[in-house]
Amino acid sequence: MDLSENYFALYQLEPSFDIDLAALKVAHRKLQTQCHPDKFSAEGAQQQRLAVQAMAYVNQAFETLSVSVKRAEYLLELAGFEANLENKTHQDPVFLMQQMEWREELSELRQLVASDEAAAEEKLQALYAEQRSLEQKIQAEFVKCYESGDFSACVAPLAKMHFTTKFAKELRAAEDELLDLD
Amino acid sequence: MLLQISEPGQSAKPHEKKLAVGIDLGTSNSVVASVRSGEPVVLADEEGQSICPSVVHYQASGPVLVGHGAEKKLLSDPANTVSSIKRLMGRGAEDIGSLGEKLPYRFVEKDGSALPYLSTAAGDFSAVEISSEILKHLSALGERSLASGASQHLDGAVITVPAYFDEAQRQATKDAATLAGLKVLRLLNEPTAAAVAYGLDQQAEGLIAVYDLGGGTFDVSILRLSKGVFEVLSTGGDSALGGDDFDQLLAQWILQQSNNEHALSAQEQRALLLKARAAKEALAGNESVDIEFGTWQGSLNRQQMSEILQPLIARSIKSCRRALRDADVSSDEIDNVVLVGGSTRTLAVREAVADLFGREPLSDIDPDRVVALGAAIQADILVGNKPDSDMLLLDVIPLSLGIETMGGLVEQIISRNTPIPVAKAQEFTTFKDGQTAMAVHVLQGERDLVSACRSLARFELRGIPPMVAGAAKIRVVFQVDADGLLMVSAEELNSGVKTSIDIKPSYGLADDEISRMLSESFSHAEDDMKARALREQQVEAERVLEALVPALEADGDLLNDEEQETIVASMERLLQVRQSAESPRDIEAAIEAVAQCTDDFAARRMDKSIKAALAGQSLDDIDSE
């Protein structure tokens, strides 16, 4: 298999941020069925090795395309643009404020988890909603810059995407605590 | 021309059924099964016993006893009779204390090995060697009951492991199989094996939760079944929670009740544990049971036992909730719950599981046999007896893999529940001028601190071309295969130099230790070892040839004439060497030669089949165009 082929081409998709995730999943299942090492078990060690590599590549491709922030980063990489994300979000004072606000909300949430479960649940859902709405806005911003071909302008929304993704993870960790699952 | 290779009937005929078994290598009991006339069946020994106690007895002189024979020695000779060895697989000397029980064995350390060795009348043995005795016993049983005509040896085995086993425990299991002379077709996760047995039996579709509480390990897996594809969505568990822990808690309770104050001898300790286990098993069918210990007499009822075991059962239920969340499904979405493992006979366990999922769990297939049956089904497919099967198992890595970074922290490389096989690359650089080597410490676990994760191995990369500090770009690829085993490769990107890697497993056997053990275990029968090695290479040669002939027929158009001729010549040479060679090395070399000239062909075929998969056509459609 041509392991240098780009992930979009592997799924016969045009490089784009807006892709059909359900169709991607269907195509992925077909590829898994085709190149899983178990399908080559009777064919000797060489074919097995190759299948493990192919399958690992396909799994990696699927993960990259199905996770929005990874997909965005990969699009820039394909465009030959190396995004250096260090310190990029600090250039946007409004977003900086947002980050600080969320940090505070998160630590309040943590305290509520220990003291008042109902209030914690309510706050958690409100923060999830906020996170989703901001994420959508940022993604739209990314798509606009990307489609206009201004890749350097893509870096700022990409950096913000990283932040909202990380924030979602932290919300999930707080929810784990709330569910007594940590 | 091409067809002639398979015509003379010199290689094994493709329609001849290969011998393959599924082995459930359990903490308390082990089972071997195989597919016969299309049905998976458990294989019984000459006495009609199909469940083999995972007990090994070593004698000063005389053979190693395994199974029922060894079990009889548990009480009379505890120091030389090893049970529950699975709990020590992939574990280090310092882990023994944390197993939460007093083991009646004498452990010794060996130079240059991180593994604990058990000192017995027949010598010092590692957990890998002791497990390999059980595997040898089961594989011999399989050969005796399956061998027919030309086929006397097993062609391969699927061996099950707890889904929650870490990489070191998996590698230890595979090493044990290697020592036992078994070809491992796959290390299969126990809950996945059980799902296969149930799924194929009942043609189930939808979401299935497998609750597997064995003698020493607990697993839970959430799977989605659809058209023969078993996709594991998440897995969780505790590789140190099982029926043995139930026995320990009950033994403590008995000890408390009896006001015993003197320290127990190894023999008394064992007797107490056996009593505790007997009481637990009796309560699966009775409301209460009478117990005697020393001068004490008393009774235990179900309610009391539930209370005693409650903390352990609660731990398992929490793991189930964790797995549900990782799979992003709620408990009421689960269509079927399957119980696996002897410990699910305990009523309190069944009740807790039914309560969590809001439905009665299934246990139609014997929970002690279901894992081996599922493994047998996969073994039959992987060995090549069922080329048209649609079944596919898509499993995940149970615990995150990471590397040590500054300050004793772990950076995750592959997170838990990622589908396998998987490969992730990480780039490193040098921090000193002219630096030619670097070390990578790989860990497994969910915590941020190195000290809270399991150390798997230290990889030392050597042969980095000398450059100024920070100029080298070393790309390290961490690949986890379908067995859940890790392989690491590294390359310096600027120069393209592949760095060599020395692996020091933290709790495993180094390659030379395995070869030493292999040669020791065969030292009394050197010819036997040679014959086996020769046979293995012959089988591999057959496999290569059998796969290539139809491949060339189907996809010969991917090659030009010259390439075809080279390949056919190498195949003819292999066929000839296979017949005449006396040394396994010669066959190996001929296989390697075939592999070399078919490398491109194999890659082109893989490419073609992937393109075909996405074009929505089967390969046959394309061929007929």
Image: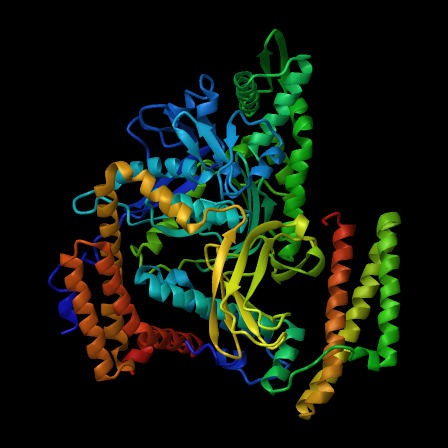
Residue at the farthest top position: B295
Left or right of B14, for residue B495: right
Point out residue B219 in the picture as x, y percentages from the top left corner: 56, 44
The quadrant in which the N terminus of chain A is found is bottom left
Task: Name the foreground residue: B553 vs B338.
Answer: B553
Q: Nearer the viewer, residue B151 or B263?
A: B263
Q: Is residue B440 above or below residue B133?
A: below
Seen at 73% across and 63% down, the residue is A169
B214 vs B248: above or below: below
The residue drawn where x is 54% and y is 31% is B345
Residue B385: horizontal and vertical position, in percent?
Answer: 29, 54
Q: Which corner quadrant of the image does residue B393 belong to?
A: bottom left
Residue projecting furthest to the front: B434
What residue is at 28 percent from the left and 38 percent from the top?
Answer: B523
Give B516 or B215, whichever is nearer the viewer. B516
In this rendering, the answer to whether B589 lies above or below A79 is: above
User: Could you tell me residue B570's position as x and y percent?
Assistant: 21, 71
Q: Nearer the viewer, residue A73 or B572?
A: B572
Render colour scheme: rainbow
Q: Residue at x 14, y 58 (%)?
A: B579
Residue B13 as seen in the image, left or right of residue A79:
left
Residue B145 makes an appearance in the image: no
Residue A108 position in % (x across, y down): 88, 58
Residue B388 visible in the snapshot: yes
